Amino acid sequence: MKYFFCFAVVALCALAFNSCGSSRLPNDYQAFLAHQQEIGRGEETPEWETVQLKRKKRELDECLVMANEESDAFRSYGVGVSYRENIALDNAESDAVSRMVQQIETAVEGARKRYTGSAGKNLSTADEERIQAMIMQFIKGTVSYRVIKTSMYDLSDGTIQCYVCIEQRVSKDEAAKGLANVLSDSGVLGIEENSDRFAESIKEDMERYRQERAESDMQ
């Protein structure tokens, strides 16, 4: 009887063990399948593949577009911000003139280096400032310029943002030749150059900078 009782207990335990094992198998197998699916899927699907993202076209201000267009005269653009419209406009115009001065100054220095090569003297700070002042005077006084486009925006902080595009009143050929003559007569460049060739070199550099600026603004 005792032997039978022990045998019954062992049989019941074995049955319980098998029952528990069989109940665990489905859960373990489901976890295994989920794990395999996760491995097969790899990285999560990017949102842009499953969701249609909203987008807004980026547009350049018309003043930037006009400044980068091919034209008969040198152009530049400027930006100004102020709580007062007239000050924003003045700031934008001053910025446009400064940009034009920098472009022409860089073109002049590039032309000068092509003439002198490694043998040319380095310009002193005083010479550079003198050239800059002469270019500024040339743009504002000698050839002058006009504002050909203005755009204004009301910003959320209450200020006004202004864009302007300016254009010299003479052609590129006239401007380059006039500037080459002014700089040659002053002797500030420290070189003996043919003014016509020098003017052509300035014009070529200005055209290259215009194209580079257009590409940069489009990015």
Image: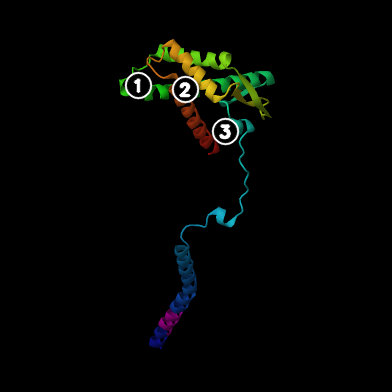
- Of 81 and 104, the residue lying toward us: 104
x, y percent for residue 141: 57, 13
Q: What residue span does the magenta drawing correspond to?
A: 8-15
**In this rendering, is residue 112 above or below 39?**
above
Residue at mark 3: 70
Amino acid carrying label 2: it is: Ala
- The structure residue drawn at horizontal position 44% and vertical position 19%, both measured from the top left corner, is 195
Q: Mark 2 or mark 1: which is in front?
A: 2
Label of residue 116 in the image: 1
Q: Please check the rendered image and state whether residue 151 is part of the magenta-colored stretch, yes or no.
A: no
Residue that sits furthest to the left in the current view: 119
**In this rendering, is residue 10 above or below 78?**
below
x, y percent for residue 38: 47, 63
Residue at mark 2: 199
Give the class, few, some or many, for how many residues have Cα within 10 Å of label 2's Cα (few <14, many ≥20): many
Between the residue at mark 3 and the residue at mark 2, the CA separation in whole angstroms equals 19 Å
Q: Secondary structure at mark 3?
A: loop
Q: Secondary structure at mark 1?
A: helix
Q: Earlier in the sequence, mark 3 or mark 2?
A: 3
